[in-house]
Structure formats: C-alpha cells, structure tokens
Image (cartoon, rainbow, N blue to C red):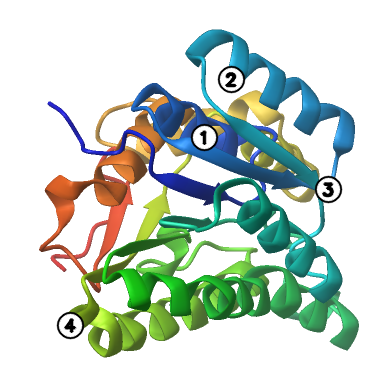
Amino acid sequence: MDLGLKDKVALVAASSRGLGRAVAEELAREGARLVLCARGGEALRETADAIRRDHGAQVVDVEADVADAASRERVVAAAMAAFGRVDVLVTNGGGPPAGPFEAHSAEAWAEAVRQNLTSVVELTRAVLPGMKARRWGRIINVTSIAVKQPVDNLILSNSVRAAVTGFARTLANEVAAFGITVNNVMPGYTRTQRVVDLAARNATLRDSTPEQEQRVWEQQIPMGRLGEPAEFGAMVAFLASERASYTTGASIPVDGGWIKSLL
C-alpha cells in the first residue's frame, strides 16, 4: 500500500528512542523527510545517522527539550530552514513520573503539564498556520491507554494526557475543513525503557520483581504479550498518510486489546 508520504515533511518529537524512534523509522521507510528532536544529543545523533543509513532519508536532528519554549522554536526554525514546511506533526514526550497523588509536588504537576500538554499546544500553534495555508496536514499526538482506562500509580499521566485528548478532539473540528486531521494514538504496554522503568517501580512498591510485574501485564493483555515499538509506528504512519484522510478526532489504541471499554 502506497501511503502517499514520499517527500512529506514530518516533525517527530522525542524521537531518539522508544516509540518516537519507531515512528520516525516507519515514516522514513515510507519516504518522508524528517525533523527529529530529543533531549539526549548523543542518542538523537545515533538515531538520525541510523535512519539516514538504513532508509536513505533526509533527516534534520535538533537537540531540544519540547517542554522549553526556546527549544521548540529552534526545532520549528530548523524544519523551516531545511524544508520550508511541516506536513506531519507527531507530538510525543517522556511520561511523567509514576507515583500516587501525595508523592507529587506542585512543581511535578507543572512539569508534567509543560512536558506533555504545553508542548503539544505550542508545537501545534507553530505549524498549524502553514498547514491551513496549504490545506493539508496531519497532527498526531502520542497519548496513552490511560486516557480510556486510568492506570494505577500514574496520576500525572492519567490527568495530563486526558487534557491532550480534549484539546485534540476540539481542534479536529476546527481545522477539518482545511484538510487537516488531528488524532491521538494510545500506546499500551510496549517494550520500551518507559515500561521497563515502570515495572521496576511497581516491583519496589509491591515487593515483587520486574519480571513478575511484566507477567501481570501480559496476563491482562488478550494477545498475551507486550507490544513492539514498530507495531505502534505503523499505526502512526497510517494516520499520517493520504489513506487516512477521513479519520479525525479519534483516539486509537495500540494495546493488544488491553482496554476493556466498548468505545
């Protein structure tokens, strides 16, 4: 299937590893040109070099923290300097710390908002005028299964990612007439460092082992296993494509059936 992404320009946030890297690799495989950013410069450069080598893609990599306004401006400026536009925006950010409500200070809440909500709003603000002018665009937010079914011990993520969902669903209606779609993709338990860290944290709280915590998740997932980052990347690439032109305002799980709700 030709997804119609050849030479489209995609900005993928937090793309040095994990889900962000998997998204970048899938978009590169489809012929997109990439702007990648992440806080860790060394890992980001390694990822960018690997994608150039393996897929022959044009890649601009910018060391940046999407929670910081100056960093966001630098990333968007780099995209404009290199390619003159952004056709596809994939917002993504490291998950907030785990823990119950009383474990998190006011600053922890503020940082979670900056990292996972403000970054989405302001990156969208930066690229939306160009998308409207060209009457084509794709905005895809990486959220979480916690939006549909809150996960214990993740009150920061449960709360802030739900706010992103409300933002995206409202924006989708506002920009649909311009040929722009806005969707969220909700990763389930996927084999990333974030999930490894969460298993270790839960093991500490429950006097178990990370392996036991992972088995608990696998037992909750109808497919009986963790997801692979590439499986998530494939869904994002489809939503970025010409083929997904009539899908907007949706929150789509990639979770092996973990979410139990009907809608």
Q: Distance between the residues labelled 4 and 3?
A: 35 Å
How packed mark 4 is, by other alpha carbons closer than 10 Å (few <14, some 14-19, many 20 or more), is few
Q: Distance between the residues labelled 2 and 1?
A: 8 Å
Residue position marked by numbered label 2 in the rendering: 51
Ranked by sequence position, the earlier of labels 3 and 2 is 3
* Of the two numbered discs 3 and 2 in the rendering, the one whose residue sits closer to the viewer: 2
Specify the quadrant that holds the C terminus.
bottom left
* Of the two numbered discs 4 and 3 in the rendering, the one whose residue sits closer to the viewer: 4
Q: Distance between the residues labelled 4 and 2?
A: 34 Å
Residue position marked by numbered label 4 in the rendering: 177
The residue drawn where x is 30% and y is 38% is: 5
How packed mark 2 is, by other alpha carbons closer than 10 Å (few <14, some 14-19, many 20 or more), is many
Q: How far apart are marks 1 and 4 (CA)?
A: 27 Å
* CB contact under 8 Å: marks 2 and 1: yes
Ranked by sequence position, the earlier of labels 4 and 2 is 2
- Pick whichever, 7 or 225, lies toward us: 7
